[in-house]
Amino acid sequence: MSKFSMKPMDVKRFSALVGPSRTPGAAYISKELAWFSNSDESILGSILLDIEDSEFVSILLGRDEGRKFRLFDLETGIKSARKAQDWLSKRMEHHTASGKKVFEQGDFTGEVMDLFTPIVADKKLHPFFLRLRDEPSFSSAKEIIAEMAPHFVDIDGNYVEQFQSTGFDARLWELYLNAYLVEEELFFDREHYAPDFIVKKFGKTVAIEAVIVGRKEAVTDETINQPIEPMPPEELIKKTMDEMPIKFGSPLFSKLKKEYWKLDHVAGNPLVIAIADFHDNQSMTWSGTALINYLYGVRHEFSKDDQGNLVISPLKIETHQVGSKVIPSGYFFQPDAENISAILYTAGGTISKFNRMGKQAGFGSAAVIMHRMGTHHDHDPNASLPKMFAYEVNEQCEETWGEGVSMYHNPNALHPVPRELFPSIAHHRFDDGQIVSTLPEFHTYSSQTLMLNVTDKI
Protein backbone atom coordinates (compact mmCIF):
# COMPACT_ATOMS: atom_id res chain seq x y z
CA MET A 1 0.00 0.00 0.00
CA SER A 2 1.51 3.32 -1.07
CA LYS A 3 1.88 6.10 1.45
CA PHE A 4 -0.57 9.00 1.07
CA SER A 5 0.96 12.22 -0.21
CA MET A 6 -0.82 15.59 -0.23
CA LYS A 7 0.04 17.64 -3.32
CA PRO A 8 0.68 21.40 -3.26
CA MET A 9 -1.56 23.29 -5.71
CA ASP A 10 -1.10 26.50 -7.65
CA VAL A 11 -3.66 29.07 -6.50
CA LYS A 12 -4.77 29.61 -10.12
CA ARG A 13 -5.91 26.01 -10.41
CA PHE A 14 -7.44 25.99 -6.93
CA SER A 15 -9.41 29.13 -7.79
CA ALA A 16 -10.57 27.69 -11.11
CA LEU A 17 -11.88 24.56 -9.38
CA VAL A 18 -13.42 26.28 -6.37
CA GLY A 19 -14.90 29.22 -8.26
CA PRO A 20 -17.67 31.20 -6.55
CA SER A 21 -17.77 28.70 -3.66
CA ARG A 22 -15.12 30.96 -2.14
CA THR A 23 -17.34 33.57 -0.49
CA PRO A 24 -16.10 37.17 -0.89
CA GLY A 25 -16.73 37.77 2.81
CA ALA A 26 -13.92 35.40 3.76
CA ALA A 27 -11.35 37.93 2.58
CA TYR A 28 -12.45 40.30 5.35
CA ILE A 29 -11.46 37.91 8.14
CA SER A 30 -8.83 35.56 6.71
CA LYS A 31 -5.97 35.24 4.23
CA GLU A 32 -5.29 32.11 2.20
CA LEU A 33 -1.70 30.94 2.56
CA ALA A 34 -1.41 27.55 0.82
CA TRP A 35 -3.43 25.16 -1.33
CA PHE A 36 -3.36 21.36 -1.64
CA SER A 37 -5.15 18.36 -3.15
CA ASN A 38 -5.12 14.59 -3.08
CA SER A 39 -3.88 12.68 -6.13
CA ASP A 40 -7.10 12.81 -8.18
CA GLU A 41 -8.20 16.26 -6.97
CA SER A 42 -11.42 14.87 -5.53
CA ILE A 43 -10.51 16.65 -2.28
CA LEU A 44 -8.95 20.09 -2.03
CA GLY A 45 -7.50 21.80 0.99
CA SER A 46 -6.32 25.23 2.06
CA ILE A 47 -4.56 26.82 5.02
CA LEU A 48 -5.77 30.25 6.08
CA LEU A 49 -4.58 32.84 8.55
CA ASP A 50 -7.28 34.27 10.78
CA ILE A 51 -6.54 38.00 10.55
CA GLU A 52 -8.14 38.93 13.88
CA ASP A 53 -6.43 36.47 16.22
CA SER A 54 -3.40 35.44 14.07
CA GLU A 55 -4.29 31.74 14.37
CA PHE A 56 -4.47 29.27 11.51
CA VAL A 57 -7.45 27.54 9.93
CA SER A 58 -7.41 24.38 7.80
CA ILE A 59 -10.31 23.58 5.47
CA LEU A 60 -11.21 20.67 3.20
CA LEU A 61 -13.45 20.92 0.16
CA GLY A 62 -15.11 18.24 -1.94
CA ARG A 63 -17.71 18.16 -4.67
CA ASP A 64 -21.33 18.35 -3.54
CA GLU A 65 -24.32 16.82 -5.31
CA GLY A 66 -24.17 19.61 -7.91
CA ARG A 67 -20.43 19.15 -8.63
CA LYS A 68 -19.42 22.33 -6.78
CA PHE A 69 -16.42 22.19 -4.47
CA ARG A 70 -17.76 23.03 -1.00
CA LEU A 71 -16.36 23.08 2.53
CA PHE A 72 -17.04 19.85 4.41
CA ASP A 73 -14.36 19.67 7.13
CA LEU A 74 -12.32 22.26 9.01
CA GLU A 75 -10.24 22.96 12.07
CA THR A 76 -9.82 26.39 13.67
CA GLY A 77 -7.58 27.86 16.33
CA ILE A 78 -4.40 26.11 15.13
CA LYS A 79 -1.27 27.70 16.58
CA SER A 80 1.21 27.20 13.72
CA ALA A 81 1.29 26.74 9.96
CA ARG A 82 3.07 23.39 10.37
CA LYS A 83 0.34 22.05 12.66
CA ALA A 84 -2.29 23.33 10.22
CA GLN A 85 -0.64 21.43 7.38
CA ASP A 86 -0.30 18.27 9.49
CA TRP A 87 -4.01 18.36 10.33
CA LEU A 88 -4.90 18.95 6.69
CA SER A 89 -2.77 16.03 5.51
CA LYS A 90 -4.18 13.59 8.07
CA ARG A 91 -7.80 14.53 7.39
CA MET A 92 -7.31 14.50 3.63
CA GLU A 93 -5.76 11.03 3.88
CA HIS A 94 -8.68 9.84 6.04
CA HIS A 95 -11.35 11.09 3.61
CA THR A 96 -9.44 9.85 0.56
CA ALA A 97 -9.19 6.35 2.10
CA SER A 98 -12.99 6.30 2.50
CA GLY A 99 -13.33 6.36 -1.28
CA LYS A 100 -15.97 9.03 -1.05
CA LYS A 101 -16.15 11.39 -4.04
CA VAL A 102 -19.37 13.30 -3.29
CA PHE A 103 -19.77 15.22 -0.03
CA GLU A 104 -23.47 15.95 0.30
CA GLN A 105 -24.59 19.36 1.53
CA GLY A 106 -28.31 18.62 1.45
CA ASP A 107 -29.29 21.85 -0.32
CA PHE A 108 -28.98 20.88 -3.99
CA THR A 109 -32.05 21.10 -6.20
CA GLY A 110 -32.52 20.82 -9.94
CA GLU A 111 -29.91 19.55 -12.38
CA VAL A 112 -26.25 20.31 -12.95
CA MET A 113 -25.77 22.58 -15.95
CA ASP A 114 -24.21 20.51 -18.76
CA LEU A 115 -23.05 22.83 -21.52
CA PHE A 116 -21.48 20.26 -23.81
CA THR A 117 -24.11 17.52 -24.23
CA PRO A 118 -26.20 18.72 -27.20
CA ILE A 119 -29.85 19.52 -26.57
CA VAL A 120 -30.44 21.01 -30.03
CA ALA A 121 -30.35 19.40 -33.45
CA ASP A 122 -26.90 18.85 -34.95
CA LYS A 123 -27.61 21.24 -37.81
CA LYS A 124 -28.29 24.03 -35.31
CA LEU A 125 -25.05 23.63 -33.34
CA HIS A 126 -22.90 26.74 -33.57
CA PRO A 127 -19.54 26.19 -35.34
CA PHE A 128 -17.66 27.84 -32.46
CA PHE A 129 -19.45 25.60 -29.98
CA LEU A 130 -18.39 22.54 -31.98
CA ARG A 131 -14.79 23.73 -32.00
CA LEU A 132 -14.91 24.31 -28.26
CA ARG A 133 -16.45 20.92 -27.62
CA ASP A 134 -14.40 18.80 -30.01
CA GLU A 135 -11.03 20.30 -30.90
CA PRO A 136 -7.98 19.55 -28.70
CA SER A 137 -6.75 23.11 -29.34
CA PHE A 138 -9.64 24.42 -27.23
CA SER A 139 -9.53 21.73 -24.53
CA SER A 140 -8.22 24.19 -21.93
CA ALA A 141 -11.21 26.45 -22.49
CA LYS A 142 -13.64 23.55 -22.47
CA GLU A 143 -12.35 22.17 -19.17
CA ILE A 144 -12.34 25.47 -17.29
CA ILE A 145 -15.83 26.30 -18.62
CA ALA A 146 -17.05 22.90 -17.44
CA GLU A 147 -15.87 23.82 -13.93
CA MET A 148 -17.73 27.14 -14.10
CA ALA A 149 -21.02 25.67 -15.28
CA PRO A 150 -22.25 24.23 -11.94
CA HIS A 151 -21.95 27.68 -10.36
CA PHE A 152 -23.68 29.62 -13.14
CA VAL A 153 -27.29 30.54 -12.47
CA ASP A 154 -29.50 30.22 -15.56
CA ILE A 155 -32.14 32.86 -14.85
CA ASP A 156 -33.87 32.56 -18.25
CA GLY A 157 -33.87 28.76 -18.43
CA ASN A 158 -32.50 28.72 -21.99
CA TYR A 159 -28.79 29.32 -21.42
CA VAL A 160 -27.59 25.89 -22.56
CA GLU A 161 -29.71 25.93 -25.71
CA GLN A 162 -28.46 29.36 -26.73
CA PHE A 163 -24.84 28.59 -25.78
CA GLN A 164 -24.95 25.66 -28.19
CA SER A 165 -26.70 27.46 -31.04
CA THR A 166 -27.59 30.99 -32.15
CA GLY A 167 -26.66 32.76 -28.92
CA PHE A 168 -23.15 31.38 -28.47
CA ASP A 169 -21.32 34.74 -28.52
CA ALA A 170 -23.76 36.45 -26.15
CA ARG A 171 -23.83 33.57 -23.69
CA LEU A 172 -20.01 33.30 -23.72
CA TRP A 173 -19.86 37.03 -22.95
CA GLU A 174 -22.15 36.50 -19.94
CA LEU A 175 -19.98 33.63 -18.71
CA TYR A 176 -16.89 35.82 -19.06
CA LEU A 177 -18.52 38.65 -17.09
CA ASN A 178 -19.50 36.18 -14.39
CA ALA A 179 -15.85 35.06 -14.09
CA TYR A 180 -14.59 38.64 -13.92
CA LEU A 181 -17.13 39.68 -11.27
CA VAL A 182 -16.24 36.64 -9.16
CA GLU A 183 -12.57 37.64 -9.41
CA GLU A 184 -13.44 41.11 -8.08
CA GLU A 185 -14.84 39.34 -4.98
CA LEU A 186 -18.34 40.77 -5.42
CA PHE A 187 -21.48 39.30 -3.90
CA PHE A 188 -24.10 38.17 -6.43
CA ASP A 189 -27.86 38.59 -6.41
CA ARG A 190 -29.24 36.39 -9.22
CA GLU A 191 -32.87 36.46 -8.13
CA HIS A 192 -34.07 38.76 -10.91
CA TYR A 193 -34.74 38.18 -14.58
CA ALA A 194 -33.07 41.45 -15.56
CA PRO A 195 -30.55 43.02 -15.58
CA ASP A 196 -28.16 40.09 -15.96
CA PHE A 197 -26.14 40.75 -12.78
CA ILE A 198 -26.81 42.51 -9.51
CA VAL A 199 -23.56 42.74 -7.54
CA LYS A 200 -22.95 44.09 -4.06
CA LYS A 201 -20.10 45.04 -1.75
CA PHE A 202 -19.35 47.58 0.97
CA GLY A 203 -23.08 48.20 1.32
CA LYS A 204 -23.35 49.31 -2.32
CA THR A 205 -25.23 47.73 -5.22
CA VAL A 206 -24.55 47.88 -8.97
CA ALA A 207 -26.76 46.46 -11.73
CA ILE A 208 -25.05 45.18 -14.89
CA GLU A 209 -26.73 44.30 -18.18
CA ALA A 210 -24.78 42.38 -20.84
CA VAL A 211 -25.10 42.98 -24.57
CA ILE A 212 -23.02 42.37 -27.70
CA VAL A 213 -22.55 43.77 -31.16
CA GLY A 214 -23.70 40.68 -33.03
CA ARG A 215 -23.20 39.35 -36.52
CA LYS A 216 -25.65 40.12 -39.30
CA GLU A 217 -25.28 36.69 -40.84
CA ALA A 218 -25.22 33.27 -39.20
CA VAL A 219 -21.76 31.84 -38.59
CA THR A 220 -20.74 28.94 -40.82
CA ASP A 221 -17.62 26.81 -41.13
CA GLU A 222 -16.80 28.76 -44.27
CA THR A 223 -16.99 32.19 -42.61
CA ILE A 224 -14.94 31.29 -39.53
CA ASN A 225 -12.24 29.68 -41.67
CA GLN A 226 -11.84 32.65 -43.98
CA PRO A 227 -8.31 34.09 -43.82
CA ILE A 228 -8.21 37.48 -42.12
CA GLU A 229 -6.48 40.04 -44.30
CA PRO A 230 -4.74 43.01 -42.65
CA MET A 231 -6.94 46.09 -42.91
CA PRO A 232 -5.33 49.16 -44.57
CA PRO A 233 -4.92 52.03 -42.06
CA GLU A 234 -7.21 54.34 -44.03
CA GLU A 235 -10.00 51.74 -44.02
CA LEU A 236 -9.52 51.11 -40.31
CA ILE A 237 -9.80 54.83 -39.56
CA LYS A 238 -12.92 55.10 -41.71
CA LYS A 239 -14.60 52.18 -39.94
CA THR A 240 -13.85 53.53 -36.46
CA MET A 241 -15.10 57.00 -37.42
CA ASP A 242 -18.62 56.05 -38.49
CA GLU A 243 -19.40 52.37 -39.14
CA MET A 244 -18.39 51.03 -35.73
CA PRO A 245 -19.98 53.83 -33.65
CA ILE A 246 -23.25 53.01 -35.41
CA LYS A 247 -22.77 49.30 -34.69
CA PHE A 248 -22.08 50.01 -31.00
CA GLY A 249 -24.90 52.53 -30.89
CA SER A 250 -27.62 50.14 -31.98
CA PRO A 251 -27.48 47.66 -29.02
CA LEU A 252 -26.65 50.42 -26.53
CA PHE A 253 -29.65 52.49 -27.65
CA SER A 254 -31.86 49.39 -27.47
CA LYS A 255 -30.76 48.79 -23.86
CA LEU A 256 -31.46 52.43 -23.06
CA LYS A 257 -35.05 51.94 -24.19
CA LYS A 258 -35.47 49.01 -21.78
CA GLU A 259 -35.48 51.50 -18.85
CA TYR A 260 -34.07 49.03 -16.36
CA TRP A 261 -33.60 51.88 -13.88
CA LYS A 262 -37.36 51.84 -13.24
CA LEU A 263 -37.25 48.30 -11.81
CA ASP A 264 -37.61 48.21 -8.03
CA HIS A 265 -34.34 46.30 -7.49
CA VAL A 266 -32.40 48.70 -9.75
CA ALA A 267 -33.93 52.07 -8.84
CA GLY A 268 -31.51 54.34 -7.02
CA ASN A 269 -28.46 52.21 -7.87
CA PRO A 270 -25.82 52.54 -10.60
CA LEU A 271 -26.70 50.77 -13.85
CA VAL A 272 -23.86 49.57 -16.09
CA ILE A 273 -24.11 48.16 -19.61
CA ALA A 274 -21.36 45.67 -20.45
CA ILE A 275 -20.76 45.45 -24.19
CA ALA A 276 -18.48 43.37 -26.42
CA ASP A 277 -17.98 43.35 -30.16
CA PHE A 278 -18.58 40.04 -31.95
CA HIS A 279 -19.78 41.42 -35.29
CA ASP A 280 -16.93 39.85 -37.30
CA ASN A 281 -13.92 37.58 -36.92
CA GLN A 282 -11.39 39.31 -34.61
CA SER A 283 -13.23 42.63 -34.93
CA MET A 284 -12.71 43.21 -31.22
CA THR A 285 -8.97 43.58 -31.84
CA TRP A 286 -9.49 46.98 -33.53
CA SER A 287 -12.96 48.37 -32.81
CA GLY A 288 -12.58 49.62 -29.22
CA THR A 289 -11.55 53.16 -30.16
CA ALA A 290 -14.86 53.66 -31.92
CA LEU A 291 -16.74 52.95 -28.69
CA ILE A 292 -14.86 55.68 -26.81
CA ASN A 293 -15.52 58.19 -29.60
CA TYR A 294 -19.22 57.36 -29.63
CA LEU A 295 -19.75 57.43 -25.86
CA TYR A 296 -18.19 60.86 -25.29
CA GLY A 297 -18.70 62.42 -28.74
CA VAL A 298 -15.06 63.33 -29.16
CA ARG A 299 -12.03 61.96 -30.90
CA HIS A 300 -8.44 62.88 -30.19
CA GLU A 301 -5.58 64.08 -32.34
CA PHE A 302 -2.00 63.70 -31.15
CA SER A 303 0.98 65.92 -31.82
CA LYS A 304 4.30 66.88 -30.24
CA ASP A 305 5.25 70.37 -29.09
CA ASP A 306 8.67 71.97 -29.58
CA GLN A 307 9.99 70.19 -26.48
CA GLY A 308 8.83 66.79 -27.71
CA ASN A 309 5.93 66.57 -25.25
CA LEU A 310 2.73 64.84 -26.32
CA VAL A 311 -0.20 67.19 -26.93
CA ILE A 312 -3.70 65.71 -27.06
CA SER A 313 -6.39 67.75 -28.79
CA PRO A 314 -10.05 66.67 -28.42
CA LEU A 315 -12.25 67.22 -31.46
CA LYS A 316 -16.01 67.19 -31.01
CA ILE A 317 -18.06 64.75 -33.10
CA GLU A 318 -21.63 65.72 -33.93
CA THR A 319 -22.87 62.69 -35.87
CA HIS A 320 -21.90 59.35 -37.38
CA GLN A 321 -23.14 58.47 -40.85
CA VAL A 322 -23.02 55.41 -43.10
CA GLY A 323 -25.08 55.80 -46.28
CA SER A 324 -28.45 57.26 -45.31
CA LYS A 325 -28.19 56.19 -41.66
CA VAL A 326 -27.20 59.01 -39.31
CA ILE A 327 -27.00 58.88 -35.52
CA PRO A 328 -25.96 61.55 -33.01
CA SER A 329 -22.61 61.06 -31.32
CA GLY A 330 -22.15 61.25 -27.57
CA TYR A 331 -24.23 58.40 -26.13
CA PHE A 332 -23.81 59.75 -22.60
CA PHE A 333 -25.39 63.05 -23.65
CA GLN A 334 -28.57 61.59 -25.18
CA PRO A 335 -32.00 61.84 -23.49
CA ASP A 336 -32.36 59.38 -20.56
CA ALA A 337 -28.68 58.39 -20.78
CA GLU A 338 -28.10 59.92 -17.34
CA ASN A 339 -29.66 56.71 -16.04
CA ILE A 340 -26.76 54.69 -17.48
CA SER A 341 -23.91 55.08 -15.01
CA ALA A 342 -21.12 53.56 -17.10
CA ILE A 343 -20.24 51.27 -19.99
CA LEU A 344 -18.01 48.24 -19.33
CA TYR A 345 -15.95 46.98 -22.26
CA THR A 346 -13.13 44.60 -23.11
CA ALA A 347 -11.78 42.99 -26.26
CA GLY A 348 -10.98 39.90 -24.19
CA GLY A 349 -14.28 38.11 -23.55
CA THR A 350 -13.57 35.42 -26.14
CA ILE A 351 -12.87 31.69 -26.39
CA SER A 352 -9.17 32.55 -26.55
CA LYS A 353 -9.42 34.19 -23.12
CA PHE A 354 -10.97 31.06 -21.63
CA ASN A 355 -8.33 28.98 -23.40
CA ARG A 356 -5.47 30.97 -21.87
CA MET A 357 -7.01 31.08 -18.41
CA GLY A 358 -7.57 27.33 -18.58
CA LYS A 359 -4.03 26.65 -19.82
CA GLN A 360 -2.37 28.62 -17.02
CA ALA A 361 -4.56 26.75 -14.51
CA GLY A 362 -3.32 23.40 -15.82
CA PHE A 363 -6.38 22.41 -17.86
CA GLY A 364 -6.42 20.95 -21.34
CA SER A 365 -4.15 18.90 -23.55
CA ALA A 366 -0.43 19.10 -22.82
CA ALA A 367 0.13 18.68 -26.58
CA VAL A 368 -1.29 22.15 -27.27
CA ILE A 369 1.29 24.94 -27.31
CA MET A 370 -0.15 28.43 -26.93
CA HIS A 371 1.44 31.79 -27.71
CA ARG A 372 -0.10 35.19 -27.09
CA MET A 373 0.86 38.52 -28.65
CA GLY A 374 -0.76 41.93 -28.54
CA THR A 375 -0.59 45.52 -27.36
CA HIS A 376 -0.66 47.07 -23.91
CA HIS A 377 -0.67 50.60 -22.52
CA ASP A 378 2.57 52.56 -22.44
CA HIS A 379 2.58 54.65 -19.25
CA ASP A 380 5.15 57.08 -20.67
CA PRO A 381 3.19 60.39 -20.65
CA ASN A 382 4.66 61.24 -24.05
CA ALA A 383 3.80 57.91 -25.67
CA SER A 384 1.21 58.06 -28.45
CA LEU A 385 1.28 54.35 -29.31
CA PRO A 386 0.91 51.24 -27.16
CA LYS A 387 3.68 48.74 -26.49
CA MET A 388 3.85 45.25 -27.95
CA PHE A 389 4.06 42.07 -25.89
CA ALA A 390 4.42 38.36 -26.62
CA TYR A 391 4.81 35.26 -24.47
CA GLU A 392 4.08 31.54 -24.27
CA VAL A 393 0.99 30.70 -22.25
CA ASN A 394 1.78 28.21 -19.48
CA GLU A 395 1.24 27.61 -15.78
CA GLN A 396 3.73 30.35 -14.85
CA CYS A 397 1.50 33.03 -16.40
CA GLU A 398 -0.55 35.34 -14.19
CA GLU A 399 -3.24 36.68 -16.52
CA THR A 400 -6.43 37.76 -14.77
CA TRP A 401 -10.04 37.83 -15.92
CA GLY A 402 -10.04 41.60 -15.43
CA GLU A 403 -6.97 42.25 -17.57
CA GLY A 404 -7.88 44.65 -20.38
CA VAL A 405 -11.30 45.60 -18.99
CA SER A 406 -12.30 49.28 -19.15
CA MET A 407 -15.15 51.11 -17.45
CA TYR A 408 -16.24 54.34 -19.15
CA HIS A 409 -18.00 56.54 -16.61
CA ASN A 410 -20.92 58.74 -17.60
CA PRO A 411 -20.18 62.37 -16.62
CA ASN A 412 -23.92 62.97 -16.27
CA ALA A 413 -24.75 59.83 -14.30
CA LEU A 414 -27.48 60.19 -11.70
CA HIS A 415 -25.88 57.35 -9.75
CA PRO A 416 -22.11 57.13 -10.37
CA VAL A 417 -20.40 53.75 -10.10
CA PRO A 418 -18.27 53.31 -6.95
CA ARG A 419 -14.82 52.62 -8.39
CA GLU A 420 -13.79 50.69 -5.27
CA LEU A 421 -16.10 47.85 -6.33
CA PHE A 422 -14.04 47.36 -9.51
CA PRO A 423 -10.45 48.01 -8.39
CA SER A 424 -8.54 45.85 -10.88
CA ILE A 425 -9.62 47.47 -14.15
CA ALA A 426 -9.10 50.70 -16.11
CA HIS A 427 -11.44 53.60 -15.35
CA HIS A 428 -12.12 56.47 -17.76
CA ARG A 429 -13.96 59.71 -17.07
CA PHE A 430 -14.77 62.82 -19.08
CA ASP A 431 -13.37 66.02 -17.60
CA ASP A 432 -13.52 69.42 -19.30
CA GLY A 433 -13.74 67.93 -22.78
CA GLN A 434 -10.92 65.43 -22.21
CA ILE A 435 -11.01 61.73 -21.47
CA VAL A 436 -8.97 61.12 -18.32
CA SER A 437 -7.88 57.54 -17.68
CA THR A 438 -6.60 55.63 -14.68
CA LEU A 439 -5.08 52.35 -15.84
CA PRO A 440 -3.51 49.30 -14.18
CA GLU A 441 0.21 48.74 -14.57
CA PHE A 442 -0.41 46.17 -17.31
CA HIS A 443 -3.49 47.05 -19.34
CA THR A 444 -3.98 45.24 -22.64
CA TYR A 445 -5.83 46.71 -25.58
CA SER A 446 -6.05 43.63 -27.78
CA SER A 447 -4.26 40.36 -28.39
CA GLN A 448 -4.24 37.25 -30.51
CA THR A 449 -3.61 33.70 -29.33
CA LEU A 450 -1.84 31.26 -31.62
CA MET A 451 -2.22 27.54 -30.96
CA LEU A 452 -0.10 24.63 -32.12
CA ASN A 453 -1.38 21.10 -31.57
CA VAL A 454 1.70 18.86 -31.45
CA THR A 455 1.20 15.30 -32.69
CA ASP A 456 3.46 12.40 -33.66
CA LYS A 457 2.00 12.27 -37.16
CA ILE A 458 4.24 13.16 -40.11
Image (tube, grey):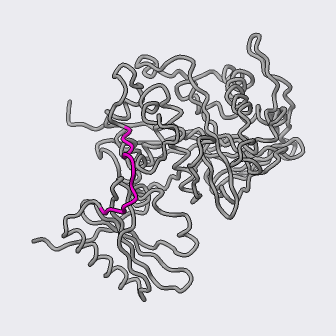
Depicted 223 relative to depicted 352: above or below:
above
Q: Is residue 147 left or right of residue 292?
A: left
Q: Residue at x 88, y 41 (%)?
A: 433
Whole-percent x, y for residue 248 in the image: 68, 28
Quadrant where the image shows the C terminus: top left
The answer to if 106 sits in the magenta stretch is yes
Q: Is residue 119 left or right of residue 199?
A: left
Q: Residue at x 55, y 75 (%)?
A: 29
Whole-percent x, y for residue 11 in the image: 43, 63
Q: Quadrant of residue 330?
A: top right
Q: Is residue 30 left or right of residue 46?
A: right
**Range of magenta residues:** 103-115
Quadrant where the image shows the N terminus: bottom left
The answer to if 214 sits in the magenta stretch is no
Between 80 and 174, which is closer to the camera in this rendering?
174
Whole-percent x, y for residue 59 in the image: 39, 73
Q: Quadrant of residue 215?
A: top right
Q: Residue at x 62, y 50 (%)?
A: 198
Q: Main secondary structure of the magenta part?
A: loop
